[in-house]
Image: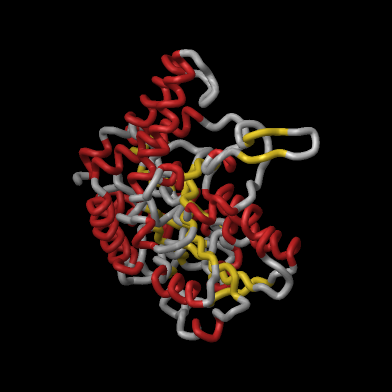
Amino acid sequence: MNPTTVRADFPILSRRVNGKQLVYLDSAATTQKPIQVIDAMNDFYRRHNASVHRGAYTLAEEATALYEGARSKIASFLDADSPREVVLTRGTTNAINTVAYGWGLYNLKPGDRILLTKMEHHANVVPWQLICRHTGAELEYLPLTDDFLVDTSNLEAVIDNRTRVVAFSGMSNVLGTIGPHAELIQAARSVGAMTIIDGAQLIPHAPTTVHDLGADFVVFSAHKMLGPTGIGAMWGRMELLEAMEPAEGGGSMIRDVQLDNSTWADVPYKFEAGTPPIAEAIGFGAAVDYLTKLGMDNVRAHEIEITRYALDRLGEIPDLTVYGPDDTSMRGGAVSFTLADIHPHDLATILDQQGVAIRAGHHCARPLMRVLDVPATARASFYVYNTLEEVDALIAALHDARRIFDVA
């Protein structure tokens, strides 16, 4: 996979920002879109636009085939046993809420425990806090080690018969840390706990199958993997999907509606209330096609190469602190750092003047920021279209920032 060749598929990467060539290093927030995704969505609106599933005319049948075709592509990408195991959601956050309110609300009780880690995105914290309010369940958190890994040294004491849910990030959006999937899932299974992996960062960056992961639910977002915003996927074990209640009610998700009760459609449709994001689903499918063509082994190999190079180059800058594992086999391409006493927001503003786009803030991970004892970090994150030369541009911009802020 040649990132220079890949870049030709991304129209936005030809932009200039503040008179400089755009260097986009914020893919952990959202990825840019290849022309293949843009064209697929454009073609739907130009030639096939109609609502799905119930129309008996040509456009509706075409739209339905495209929408369900996207579901099948996602299922194949995950090596799922059936497309019916894939629920199309509004994204990772919506998917976690679907599990929390469709499973947790009906299965948790006072004294039950939900185990998370201290590196979770708010999307995998706040829904469980709300469920605890409703059910009386309690939250517990696994700490981190000094080298930014999830600390599982006391796992046998933490996971017991009161543990009902183990929910964790497959890859941290701040530290890049890859979660200890096998260890956590095996421990959860030993006590009969349900497991859910927040795959928003993992699924786009590494070859992954739901069988290898072994969790009960895997959730992720299209816009983190070259697709559009507003859509994601929830893979779940069929027996759990069939037993769960829907988290939302409305049209499309019902089998029948009486004045005093309703019955639900089959899985996965009972979780897809209302008119779905059809064009976005088609774009999602096109993004899956694009990544499949690149090859996820190649995607991961490129990420390891560019992340190693970035970590080495960042290590050359005085007064710069990186937060995350140094071992690239244990991490992804989200690299968070601070530079002397320069606030990350100021740093991002200065870098933008050089055309370098990075993220600054708490990255929807305030509990983790408190663990790191910082109010915020700057973050550069890499994907299939980034080059080593763009890392060099980042380093040059950081040296400029040191001079501008007169860092000794």
Q: Quadrant of residue 343?
A: bottom right
Foreground residue among 75 and 332: 75
Asked if residue 320 can be seen in this view, the reply is no
Residue at 37 percent of width and 49 percent of height: 81
In the image, taking residue 172 as reference, residue 293 lies left or right, namely left
Residue 33 placement (x, y as % from top left) = 38, 36
Seen in the picture, residue 176 relative to 226 is either above or below; the reply is: below
Q: Residue at x 59, y 38 (%)?
A: 265
**Which residue is at 44% across, 51% downward?**
28
Q: x, y percentage for residue 160?
A: 57, 81
Q: Residue at x 45, y 57 (%)?
A: 379
For the C terminus, give its image quadrant: bottom left
Viewer-side residue, 59 vs 313: 59
Image coordinates of residue 253 in percent, x first then y, are 61, 36
Q: Is residue 308 left or right of residue 146?
A: left
Image height check: is 248 above or below 311? above
